[in-house]
Image: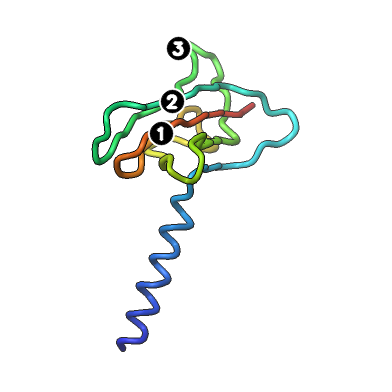
Amino acid sequence: MKTIACCLVVFLSISVVLIYGDSRQWGRRVSGDRLLDYAVAVNNSLPVPEKSSIYRYLPAAGAYRPPNITAIVARDNVPAGKGGYAGIVSGGVNQSNVTLKLTSKPYQRFNFTIEIYGR
């Protein structure tokens, strides 16, 4: 029983590391996609345990048929893996909006380039 528990803990730990990589991509760009939004999110403030920011992409107000998101790329621009993590809070691929939460590693800064593609 202890062996199974140890294996499970190791497997979950590795999974968390793989899921929360520095740069993230959801979905896939295909021919015909266009860049819906491009943003750079930077936080170089004083060293605190954790910095976070929310990024939202919403289609234009009153759009007759808002574009469908096909790919989201959150690229970490801080070298040596000292940047942060990105995660989807709501919306996402195959929807018309997305909300991302950008979080720094402890006592570090973050700098993300965010690209949203769709059609």
Residue at position x 46%, y 54% in the image: 19
Residue designated by label 1? 110
Which quadrant of the figure contains the N terminus? Answer: bottom left
Q: Earlier in the sequence, mark 1 or mark 3?
A: 3
Cα distance in 3D space between marks 1 and 3: 30 Å
Foreground residue among 37 and 65: 37
* Location of residue 60 with respect to 26 vertically, above or below: above
Label annotation for residue 87: none
Q: Earlier in the sequence, mark 1 or mark 2?
A: 2
Foreground residue among 35 and 20: 20
Instruction: Say left or right for 79 vs 54.
Output: right
Mark 1 Cα shell of 10 Å, populated few (<14), some (14-19), many (≥20): many
* Location of residue 38 with respect to 106 vertically, above or below: above
Cα distance in 3D space between marks 2 and 3: 23 Å
- Camera sees residue 86: no
Q: Element under label 1?
A: strand
